[in-house]
């Protein structure tokens, strides 16, 4: 399954709790779209978030975010993990 | 120690081997700067790379890249890992 890094550049008012809440929604919905949200990293000062996602397609990864909380990423990039 | 995600938007001619070689240089030099290069992900099609780095400062993380291979990131963002 492809691996994606998605990049949210600026989520207004982002807090650790808001990030955790949004991620919890992703985890609830991921099975429906055959995706697995593996990790995320956030920067409270800028509202930036990176999510690492295993998903059957870019569209599936986007659909989880859209349905769960509406915070669709600015970019979603297919990546391979380095050795 | 702070955690950083660095973002290289486009490394011309990036291949898996080139990414691996550059990362090996980072690993060689990281102790000198008190840093630890934890993971990286790359997109061969665009030359994009994300590196996850534990480092005492942004400057220390940048110094490792600069000395090792000169491929300094376009952005380096202090992040926290989500739960």
Image (cartoon, coloured by chain):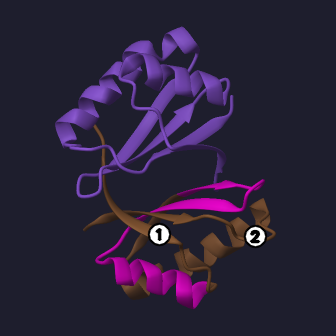
Chain colours: A brown, B purple
Q: Quadrant of residue A33?
A: bottom left
Q: Residues within 10 Å of mark 1 (few under 14, many from 20)?
A: few
Q: Nearer the viewer, residue B81 or A12?
A: A12
Q: Position of residue A11 (x, y in %)?
A: 70, 70
Q: Nearer the viewer, residue B41 or A35?
A: B41
| Count of all numbered marks drawn on residues in the image | 2
Q: Residue at x 62, y 80 (%)?
A: A71
Which numbered disc, 1 or 2, marks the residue that appears first in the sequence? 2
Task: Specify whether A58 is left or right of B32.
Answer: left
Image quadrant in which the C terminus of chain A is located: top left
Where residue A75 is drawn, which disc sits there?
1
Residues in magenta? A40-68
Q: Quadrant of residue B35?
A: top right
Q: Magenta span has A42?
A: yes
Q: Residues within 10 Å of mark 2 (few under 14, many from 20)?
A: few
Where residue A18 is drawn, which disc sits there?
2
Q: Residue at x 34, y 29 (%)?
A: B23
Task: For residue A34, say whether it is visible.
Answer: no
At mark 2, the secondary structure is helix
Q: Residue at x 52, y 42 (%)?
A: B6
Identify the chain of the residue marked 2, using the numbered disc in the image: A
């Amino acid at each position: 399954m492809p691996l994606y890094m998605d990049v949210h550049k600026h989520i207004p008012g982002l807090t650790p709790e808001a990030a955790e809440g949004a991620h919890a929604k992703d985890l609830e919905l991921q099975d429906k779209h055959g995706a697995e949200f593996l990790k995320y990293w956030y920067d409270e000062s800028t509202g930036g978030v990176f999510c690492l996602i295993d998903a059957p397609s870019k569209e599936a990864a986007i659909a989880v975010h859209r349905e769960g909380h509406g915070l669709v990423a600015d970019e979603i990039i297919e990546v391979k993990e380095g050795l």
